[in-house]
Amino acid sequence: MASSLDIRLAAASDADHVVALIGRLLTEISSAVGSPQFEFDTMAAKGTASHLLYQRQMAALLAWAGTLPVGIITLSPCHALYAGGSFGIITELFVDPPYRAHGIGAHLVAAARRYGVEQGWARLEVTTPPLPVFERTLHFYQRLGFAITGGHKLKLPL
């Protein structure tokens, strides 16, 4: 499945796809923990996503299986002395359930790494969804080289 995968940087015109995938991610997290974790206004989110993508204040990499968007990773640039300057935060990562276990998540993280290097970032950081419910997510990131830095925040030097 991953061999026919195309990962592309989302444009502002892709806001509908970005919001749809992130909406499914937030619904999945809320369902898994048994309570609403996020208030997500789809209409407002489309405008926000379009603006952030257009202004390059956020990057979204979409995984496409043919003409169908099946995964997403979103990144935000940050700056901190503890990180040695500029770095990126993975704010969302989602692969549609029927497309999981085919390496798409790993391909999205690899694309995020390449994007981060192009941006001059020192590393990527991510915070996992609630544990222990999403213990598999923690192990996924660790398999890709992320190291626990404190709490549930992970980092991956670039």
Image (cartoon, rainbow, N blue to C red):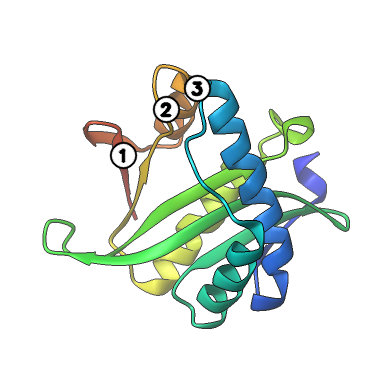
- Residue at image coords 72%, 38%: 96
Disc 1: which residue = 154
On the picture, is 57 further left or further right than 49?
Answer: left
Disc 3: which residue = 33
- Residue 85 seen in the current view: no
Residue density around tag 2, few if under 14, some if 14–19, many if 20 or more, within 10 Å: many
Name the secondary structure under disc 1: strand
The picture places residue 93, in percent across and down from the top left corner, at: 55, 45
- Residue 125 seen in the current view: yes
The picture places residue 139, in percent across and down from the top left corner, at: 44, 24
Disc 2: which residue = 138
Q: Closer to the camera: disc 2 or disc 3?
A: 3
Kind of residue at badge 1: Leu
The picture places residue 106, in percent across and down from the top left corner, at: 57, 41
Marks 2 and 1 close (CB-CB < 8 Å): yes
Q: Earlier in the sequence, mark 2 or mark 1?
A: 2
In the displayed orientation, state which residue is furthest to the right.
Answer: 67
Please identify the quarter of the rendering in which residue 44 is found: bottom right
- Near-viewer residue (129 or 47): 47
Marks 2 and 3 close (CB-CB < 8 Å): no
Q: How many marks?
A: 3
Q: Earlier in the sequence, mark 1 or mark 3?
A: 3
